[in-house]
Image (cartoon, grey):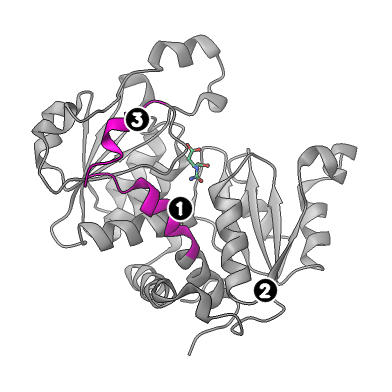
Amino acid sequence: MNHDHIISAKQLSRADIEAVLDRAAEFAADPSAWGDRHENALLGLLFFEPSTRTKMSFTAAIKRLGGDVVDMGTVESSSVKKGESLADTVRVVEGYADALVLRHPSEGSAKMASEFVDAPLINGGDGAGQHPTQTLLDLYTIRENAGFEDLTIGIMGDLKYGRTVHSLAHALTNVDARQHFVSPESLRLPRSVRYDLHEEGASIREHTELDTVLSELDVLYVTRIQRERFPDESEYRAVAGEYQIDTETLEAAKDDLTVMHPLPRVDEIAHDIDGTDHARYFQQAHNGVPVRMALLDILLGGDR
Ligand code: NCD
């Protein structure tokens, strides 16, 4: 893999993806065995939006590799509060760390910030744009459970604002998956994403009802309605609570359907699914550690 920064899933080739997932599988076999691999490496965390999984699993990943984090903390407690620009912030933090992870509410912010630094910058989510490391752990989970061969996947929920969806769709094109997008009309995939997917030769279909396609799916990827990105709360309320699944919904699904969700969930997946063999979303979240270990290892020069 030969990338200075990880900004978008679009930049990842099939070979890049396989390289990260294969390395992740090695780390996953015994995550605690790699403490001398990147001793003293420092990862700078710049989170301008809330995060549990991305931030904690990056922290766990660098610590498992023998390194540590330097964390900007909350926007409220940083100099961003005094009006410091993102460009200045990343230029400063680059001097404190060997690689950076940025999460920011503005689409395009990671790309912009990466132009100011030499250290590898990883996009941990830029507004409704991209979330490439989530995509890598999603792919790891898909490969583990359903495999990439002859894969049919349904992606349901907020396809308009969901950055995990925008990222994943590009990567799935690389593994030749058949993709079915299920959402209310108002939350369809953005035109620009559809356009890019067509250009890449993706196999995509759009639906407003899950039951038209459920029985064909190997994987169902459910997402949260991204309330914080709606310009108007009444628009959110108009779609909130739609597209929920429970064990009854899944009666029409294949027995070995894999149900995924980037989490956090609100009410999209009923708790009665948690105990079934379909539920893979907690395993998916756990896969964030070995997958981020693998990506950091490669970016920090661990290639053998
Ligand atoms: C996602 C995100 O931040 O885009 N969370 C995550 O990183 N797992 C999904 C979401 O917030 O709905």
Residue 67, which numbered label?
Answer: 2
**Residue 188 rendering spot, x and y as whole percentages:** 34, 28
Q: Which residue is mark 3?
A: 157
Outermost residue, bottom side: 304
Left or right: 156, with 215 as reference point: right
274 above or below 144?
above
| Secondary element at image label 2 | loop
Q: Which residues are magenta?
A: 267-289
Q: Nearer the viewer, residue 104 or 211?
A: 211
Q: Can residue 209 be seen from the camera position used here? A: yes
**Disc on the earlier residue, 3 or 1:** 1
Q: How many residues crowd around disc 1 within 10 Å: few (fewer than 14), some, or many (20 or more)? A: many
Q: Amino acid at mark 3?
A: Gly
**Residue 183 rendering spot, x and y as whole percentages:** 30, 27
Q: Amino acid at mark 1?
A: Gln
253 above or below 101?
above
Q: Nearer the viewer, residue 33 or 8?
A: 33
Q: Which residue is mark 1?
A: 134
- The answer to if 103 sits in the magenta stretch is no
Residue at left 59%, top 45%? Answer: 108
Q: Amino acid at mark 2?
A: Gly
Q: CA distance from mark 3 to mark 1?
A: 17 Å
Q: CA distance from mark 3 to mark 2?
A: 37 Å
Quarter residue 23 falls in: bottom left
Mark 1 residue CB less than 8 A from any atom of ligand 1: yes
